Amino acid sequence: MIGGAAGDGTFLSGNILARTLMREGLHVFATNEYLSVIRGGYQWYLIRASEREVYSQISRVDLLVALNRDAIKRHKSLLRKDGIMIIDPKDFNNISPSPDIRLVKVPLTDFVHEVRGKRVMRNSAALGATMAVLGYNLETLLSVIRDVFKGREEDLKVNLLLAEKGYSHVKGDSKINSIKLKKSNKIFITGNDAISLGALKAGLGLYVAYPMTPASPILHFLARVQREYEILVFQPESEIAAINIAIGAAYAGVKSMVGTSGGGFSLMTEALGLAAMSETPIVIVVAQRPGPSTGMPTFTSQGDLRFVLHASQGEFPRVVLAPGDVEEAFYLTIKAFNIAWKYQVPVILLTDKYLAESGKSTVLDENLISIEEGKIIRGTYRDVIPYRRYRLTEDGVSPMALPGTKGAIVKANSSEHDEGGFVTTDPNRVVQMVDKRFRKLRELEREMKRSNPVGIYGDEESIILISWGSTKGPILEAQNILRNQGIMTKFIHVKWLAPFPTELLVSETRNKNVIVIENNRTGLLNSLLREHLLIDADHKILKYDGRPFYPEEIAEEVKEVANL
């Protein structure tokens, strides 16, 4: 764990260390916590690294890099016996840690003064010391620093020098046998990074968003690469403008995506209905945080599930996908674009702060990707039947010609309309068009069944753990804890929330002890189980303090509710 004040470079140094450990061949997971302030508030970055794949943080800390007194005050109790704490003695006089804790004193501030660097650069010396304590190769750290500060030669030079000073100060004092593994082709990405990469792979042409934590990093990522990938990234004046711009671009044939959180999505709901009525494909990322109102902007929650399922007026088919980790965030983003354009419906990708901003080492396989577009007409319309934008079809999906298509007059309408796009209130035509749009639902359900809508992990036993979204990682780790204690469970992770995988879940939960695990107060997934399966979970493990689950607390609660 690296702990310090906002503005001290805590997150950047944590990201550098995570990538360094990954390059040493380890599997890495990292997460963070911070307040909604620019400077001064306390924040921490937690890295877990192992020779096996890791899926979440755990409650124990082996090594604490304390960049201020708050780090010691808040986290000293989390250090395990024989844990290590790296401190700058100049800032931490009269520190008396437990005799079970090994104190490593590194003159970070003095090193910075020696090289005439900035105070924030103390982190590089601390990272060098950390590599020495862990018994790893300094050159791996230096290679990551070179990547991070590429093009900033003066800063690069000073940070490299400080990392070397920190390493040399501690070298030879390491008492840890580091794990040496074969280097791999893994990359270290967050959930937001994975969504950005998935969108680019799917053919993204426009990303438009008004900044809102925790979705803002998608805006930052795509803005950095927009020229390289020949896309347009735009920040308008509001969330309402963002979604309307994206709908307009999609009408013109550009694959578009918007990103926001619950408060921003609240402003987008009328335009969500516009996309549905005009049958314009759009992908919306909703990254959840605690509400209502402003809530806690920089913390995590799963409280918006029912909101996104029912947002906007009227009835229309939509798709809601909820990835559980960075790999699913990548592949489900591509799936979201495929569905939106193939079926001409709005698709919502539902994440949360924990997934959005946590990082994981992973390998993304391009062989698992296929791009679909559906009935899109580009260039010239050649059918003998006059073009009608909302032609009645068996599957409910009409040919979508783009404005400017030769041989076609392209109309779009936000009011109820006939096949040609002209406003209608005729009862028979209204019924025809509503039924036409809902015929897509039948096709979407088939699509869902072909797409592995749930993940199933663990053993064929009577205890069934069910959840969705970012709780996946902590539950997988909790299963390992329980398995080591001789307690077998099966974990069902629901990725498709609309359409809902009713038949599959019925077969998996019949006559079983069901425990629902969610980051909300009211058990929103459990309400879907009642609605679609007519079952109520035997037990619910709910957490709603803005923090993600720790595997240890899930394991303990499972044992308690299952009377084990």
Image: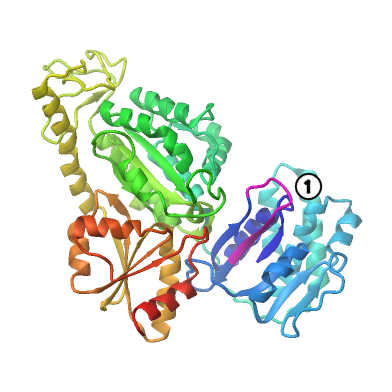
**Residue occupying the far left of the picture:** 428
Residue at label 1? Answer: 155
Residue beneath the point at 22% across and 55% down: 531
* Horizontal side of residue 156 vs 282, given as left or right: right
Residue 388 picture location, percent across and down: 18, 19
Please report the residue visible at 11 percent of the width from the left and 28 percent of the height from the top.
Answer: 432
- 482 is higher (above) or lower (below) than 221: below
Residue 392 seen: no
- Magenta range is 36-47
Q: Nearer the viewer, residue 507 or 370?
A: 507
Q: Quadrant of the N terminus?
A: bottom right
Q: Using residue 8 as the reference point, say whether residue 234 is left or right of it.
A: left
Residue at 41% across / 26% down in the picture?
244
440 up-or-down from 520: above or below: above
**543 vs 190, nearest the viewer:** 543
Q: Quadrant of the C terminus?
A: bottom left
User: Please, is residue 98 above or below residue 46 in the view?
Assistant: below
Residue 221 lies, in percent from the top left, at: 55, 41
Q: Amino acid at mark 1?
A: Asp
Q: Is residue 442 magenta?
A: no
- Callout 1: helix, strand or loop? helix
- Residue sticking out furthest to the right: 114
| Front residue of this view, candidates 391 and 532 | 532
The quarter holding residue 533 reads bottom left
- Rendering colour mode: rainbow
